[in-house]
Image (cartoon, rainbow, N blue to C red):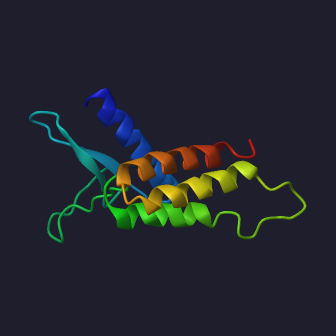
């Protein structure tokens, strides 16, 4: 895998963990070691059941259905916010930027931004 592919893979895994998707693995061909994306395995060892519908890809980097689910989850994180704590202004700014980027209908900038949102959330309160 190239460094760009490794970075993309790590970002997809980060987003998948945020979404609580289990058993994510990179799909790399053995012959030429070419990276093809991330799939959801049948178990924690990376097994694929080819008898059903084929490979279950996880692709928030180019599938709006996967990506919008992440945006929605991030947008609703603080619905039940404890008013006794200061509200994180950064969160509002991140949500506003997400809304703006989605309105341009370009998936790559939205994915890149939501990765930054998840990184912010993972470090929030630490």
Number of numbered discs overlaid on the protein picture: 0
Q: Residue furthest top?
A: 3
Q: Residue furthest left?
A: 31
Image coordinates of residue 42 in percent, x first then y, are: 31, 61
> Which residue is at the front of the view, 116 or 46?
116
Whether residue 66 is visible here, answered yes or no, is: yes
> Which residue is at the front of the view, 105 or 63?
105
Tell me the quarter of the image containing the N terminus.
top left
* Quarter of the image where one finds residue 82: bottom right
Image coordinates of residue 71 in percent, x first then y, are: 51, 61
Whether residue 40 is visible here, answered yes or no, is: no
In the image, residue 82 above or below residue 60: below
Q: Residue at x 50, y 51 (%)?
A: 114
| Relative side of 66 to 30, left or right | right
* Quarter of the image where one finds residue 35: top left
Tell me the quarter of the image containing the C terminus.
top right
Image coordinates of residue 83 in percent, x first then y, are: 86, 64
Q: Residue at x 56, y 65 (%)?
A: 73
Image coordinates of residue 24 in percent, x first then y, are: 37, 52
In the image, residue 104 above or below residue 6: below
Q: Residue at x 70, y 48 (%)?
A: 90
> Which residue is at the front of the view, 51 or 33?
33
């Amino acid at each position: 895998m190239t460094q760009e592919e490794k970075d993309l893979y790590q970002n997809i895994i980060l987003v998948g963990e945020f979404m609580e998707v289990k058993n994510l693995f990179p799909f790399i061909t053995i012959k030429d070691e070419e990276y093809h994306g991330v799939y959801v395995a049948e178990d924690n060892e990376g097994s694929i059941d080819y008898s059903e519908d084929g490979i279950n890809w996880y692709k928030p980097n180019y599938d709006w259905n996967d990506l919008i689910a992440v945006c929605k989850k991030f947008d609703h994180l603080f619905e039940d916010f404890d008013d006794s704590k200061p509200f994180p202004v950064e969160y509002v700014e991140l949500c506003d930027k997400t809304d703006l980027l989605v309105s341009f209908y370009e998936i790559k900038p939205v994915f890149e931004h939501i990765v930054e949102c998840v990184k912010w959330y993972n470090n929030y309160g630490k």
